[in-house]
Amino acid sequence: MKFNSMFSPIDIGPMRVPNRFVVSPMCNNYANTDGTLTDTSLAYYKERALGGFGLITFEATVVDVRAKGGANKACLYSDHQIASFKRVIDACHDAGAKISVQLQHAGPEGNSKVSGHPLKAASAIASAQGRNTPEAISREEIYELIELYGETALRAKKAGADAVEIHCAHGYLVSSFLSGRTNKRVDEFGGCFENRMRLPRLIIESIRKRVGHSIAILCRINSTDGVDGGLSVQDSATVAAYLEDCGLDGLHVSRSVHIRDEYMWAPTVLHAGFSSDLVTQIKQAVSIPVITVGRFTEPHYAELMVREGRADLVAFGRQSLADPQTPNKAAADKLDELLPCIACLQGCVANMYAGKPITCLVNPLLGRESEAYLPKTPSKKVVVIGGGVGGLYAGWMAGSRGHDVTVYEASDIIGGQMRLAAYPPGKGDLTNMVRSYIKKCEQFDVEIKTNAPVTKELIQEISPDAVIIATGATPLVLPIPGIEDSGLIHAVDLLDGKESCGKKVLVVGGGMVGSETAAFLGEAGHDVTVVELRDEVGADVISEHRKFLMRDFDEYKINSITNAKVTSFFPDGVTYSLADEEEYRIDGFDSVVLAMGSRAYNPLEEAIKEIVPETYVIGDAVRARRALDATKEALDAVLQL
């Protein structure tokens, strides 16, 4: 497919963007605690500029010291912060990208513990259960804030920014004024549509007064809030048209408030363009350029959106984290080398909420971009044992740094647990990650051997300089009466097609693997029951994924028994005890599937270290954990070679 539309330039106000690829504003927690940008920030943004993105939107940048939503948030509420922004912006300009700085007041989604000030919103309505109830911001504070937006925009201009983007989405402060659901005011900022739009209008005017038309002004809005009483797409189209009449140069159309954040963060089950019909309605309402965003990974549907006139630019958020070279690879017709975002949300969204620097399962170099350019050590002969994603990543990275690498996989197929994780409903994109790692190994002449179990004798024969052990994990089989001779099926064997089930199935273990296996069976028409020790199934599943998983449980009528400790196994069922210490039995199942977890599989470390002192153990071979840990540890090991 040709991406002619995606590689055409476009004007947004006074700013000419060289192509239609945009980096979304994403909180990364790389900033200093005083709000200045760091060397890590510089390397992160520069890498995406070098990767070919035409417009890079800096993370939500705080406009008011009283509204800082995190300890390491970027800020521009003070002149002392300008220099650090200028240094990063200059580096991105040198690489060919235009820069927009998103201006934000977090409002009810802020963090009063960090800022030392109470949360503010249009009205005193908590954004969700567990969040502090904000104070209704006073009229005097509103007019002060309007001036702060203008002053912050001027600082962005002084730092060299080509544009600023006013954050009016996702339930943050400005967003809380736009919707009658969260705006119950009875002053000039509440009530009718014109009054609810007064705040963004005055912010635009404040910015224009200070910067004129020397830089572009954009707004990020929701296509829909996604909740009853919130902004509908019809409301948002009207908002868009109103903002254009206020002199806005462009729109960045996102989706949802935080209590519907499954449509903000878009887990794996959602695909590119899932909001396209909503964005189209916004685009029809305005003549200014519109940026669309939402789970874009490969650029094919993005090209259609621009080609068909349904959007003007496309923001690749988490995909730019996974592969900052996405535009360059599209331009060079090398998309088979693309590292795909698999929307796992493990390193980006989870770390963002925790106030930690964001990371990426697919791309462990995220936030460590400068380490990719560390001096290479003399070439070594490296053996990697295990062809899961940890082993593959280690093989690729070692090969890219000039080492002679061979990956040994005991089974007949590459991919390990990640390959099997792609089988449950909505998880197919995980296969893309496995394939991309194999391609990267091929690119750097890494030899991959399958059906090749490793022994101490083989290592002695090969005599490598270094060994990386990534042998993964095996199913956990607890010493429960009957478990060894009940004829049960391991979930991994079921997903791998080595076993099959009858109509009525009991899944023992309701963590991520068990729950997703149950959904896999339910989708195929099996009658499924899950028994789980904890008080809910899918307790270890990230919330945005879990919402869709529980939808599958409802749709496929999957039964669950929780707080249940399994005490014995039978060919057609189990006994279990509850909190009342009574024992219960469920039976009559055609098949029993075991999904009680995994245990590290590492039979070789001790023997190999006697032969090869430079031996590293990574991932599940250390202990059964997330793939995020495996790829990070693979990078750490390779950089020590």
Image (cartoon, rainbow, N blue to C red):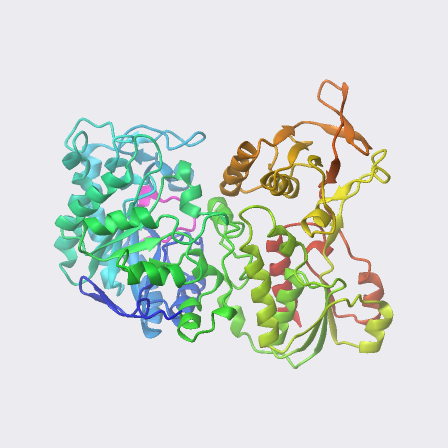
Which residue is more in the foreground, 51 or 188?
51
The magenta stretch spans residue 611: no
Number of callouts: 0
The magenta stretch spans residue 71: yes
Image position, residue 312 (x, y; %):
27, 60
Residue at the limit of the structure toward the bottom, as seen here: 378
Examine the residues drawn in magenta and state their main secondary structure. loop
The correct choice, above or below, for 171 with respect to 364 in the image is above
Image position, residue 537 (x, y; %):
61, 34
The correct choice, above or below, for 58 with respect to 383 in the image is above
The correct choice, above or below, for 460 with respect to 29 in the image is below
Q: Quadrant of the C terminus?
A: bottom right
Whether residue 54 is visible here, answered yes or no, is yes
Whether residue 70 is visible here, answered yes or no, is no
In the displayed structure, does residue 263 sit left or right of residue 485? left
Image position, residue 153 (x, y; %):
23, 55
In the displayed structure, does residue 92 sit left or right of residue 455? left
Q: Which residues are magenta?
A: 64-75
Image position, residue 427 (x, y; %):
55, 50
Q: Quadrant of the N terminus?
A: bottom left
At a point 39% along the width and 37% down the height, the residue shown is 112
Residue 263: image quadrant is top left
Residue 394: image quadrant is bottom right
Residue 164: image quadrant is bottom left
At a point 70% along the width and 51% down the height, the residue shown is 497
In the displayed structure, does residue 231 sit left or right of residue 588? left
